[in-house]
Amino acid sequence: MLGLGQALVDELQAMSIHIGLSDVKDCFHRLKQPRWLAEYFCFKPICASWVNLGGTTLDGVPLKDNDIVYPMPGSLRMGFSWSLFFAQKINKYQCSLTRSLTCSRIISDSSLASSAMSPKRVRVL
């Protein structure tokens, strides 16, 4: 094998490299946001009967069919500027809990996002 010593060849063949990729694709829908955050993203008001909440109790108040409620999303909202940050932090933490990755180094891109509005730098000679 290219003039390498047999010991080196055996050592290279015994090595194994594992590469993993974790992505936050669609993660917004898999992450349940806390109630305090969900309250900021309520949907338009609807009658309680439209979502089968008539006759139930909400925050200690019994709801009638014609009571108005503001549905809250359970998952992180796409478009909310902090959603991606939360998703990345949670994803990174979950990777750190994986036993097979305890000796691994997690690499993530922490650079600032580029902006179409930021001025372009031109070097003039």
Image (spheres, helix red, strand yellow):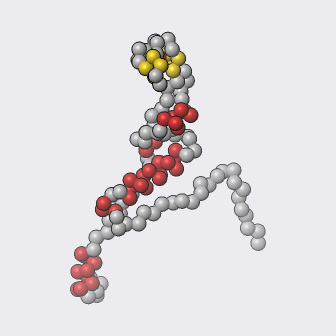
Judge whether residue 118 can be spotted in this image.
yes
Q: State the residue at coordinates (43%, 39%).
A: 32
Residue located 47% across and 53% down the image: 89
- For the residue pair 89 and 112, the one nearer the viewer reads as 89
Location of residue 13 in the rendering, given as x and y in whole percent from the top left corner: 25, 76
Task: Using the image as rendered, state which of residue 19 and residue 4 is in the foreground.
Answer: 19
Q: Is residue 10 above or below residue 116?
A: below
Quadrant placement of the C terminus:
bottom right
Residue 18 placement (x, y as % from top left): 32, 65
Looking at the image, residue 97 sits to the left or right of residue 33; the answer is left
Outermost residue on the right side: it is 125
Kindly identify the residue that appears in the image at 47 percent across and 19 percent down: 61
**Picture coordinates of residue 97, whole percent (x, y):** 35, 57
Residue at position x 59%, y 57% from top? 112
Q: Residue 55, image x and y in percent?
A: 41, 14
Q: Depth check: 66 or 105 in front?
A: 66
Residue 60 versus residue 109 in the image, above or below: above
Q: Residue 54 occupies which quadrant of the picture? A: top left
State whether residue 91 is above or below residue 48. below
Quarter in which the N terminus is drawn: bottom left
* Total count of labels: 0
Is residue 53 at all visible to an observer of this figure? no
